[in-house]
Amino acid sequence: MAKLVFGGAAVIALLAYCAFYIYTGGKGIYLWGGAGWLSGAIFAALFMRIMFPFTLGAFYFASQEWGLHWTFASVWALPGLAVALPSAVAGIYGWSRDNFGDLFRSRAQREAEEEAAQQRLAYMREFFEQQKRE
């Protein structure tokens, strides 16, 4: 029971931290660029899953509004970078794999994929021939 209570409290604390982080990011974007930039950042976050502007906004808010030194403001923005950078690397890798996939496959992988495609083609031919006989 204690683990459940502690886990629930940890989830609630994490959600509160995330909400406050997004709030400070939004306030920082609003202070820097106004409502138009904030609307663009919200659109990017909701429809394109790009949260990096909120990280920059959190840094700006911490340094300008709270008056923190840039090193401490960076510590405040660091969790957003810890999520944004691996996400960006994964996105770039996925895009490059989709567009330049043959460069990332070994000869054995290409041969295995070609063999699997030939097996599927043979199965489909056999299936359609069987349908014609019936």
Image (cartoon, helix red, strand yellow):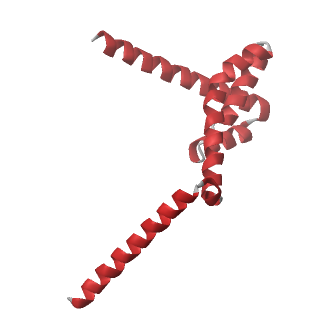
Q: Nearer the viewer, residue 66 or 1?
A: 1
- Residue 131, x across and y down, in percent: 25, 85
Hey, which residue is sitting farthest bottom in the picture?
133
Q: Nearer the viewer, residue 133 or 91?
A: 133
Q: Residue at x 45, y 67 (%)?
A: 115
Q: Which part of the image, by quadrant, shows the C terminus?
A: bottom left
Q: Residue at x 58, y 22 (%)?
A: 20
Q: Residue at x 61, y 24 (%)?
A: 21
Q: Quadrant of residue 117?
A: bottom left
- Residue 76, x across and y down, in percent: 67, 18
Q: How many marks?
A: 0
Hey, which residue is sitting farthest top in the picture?
2
Look at the picture and state if 103 lies above or below 117. Answer: above
Is residue 66 visible to the viewer in this orientation of the structure? no
Q: Is residue 33 left or right of residue 96?
A: right
Look at the picture and state if 132 lies above or below 95. Answer: below
Look at the picture and state if 104 lies above or below 115. Answer: above
Q: Quadrant of residue 17?
A: top right
Q: Which part of the image, by quadrant, shows the N terminus?
A: top left
Q: Residue at x 60, y 50 (%)?
A: 94
Q: Is residue 132 left or right of residue 125?
A: left
Is residue 95 visible to the viewer in this orientation of the structure? yes
Q: Nearer the viewer, residue 13 or 79?
A: 79
Q: Quadrant of residue 101?
A: bottom right
Look at the picture and state if 72 lies above or below 98. Answer: above
Hey, which residue is sitting farthest left in the picture?
134
- Residue 19, x across and y down, in percent: 55, 25
Hey, which residue is sitting farthest front in the picture?
108
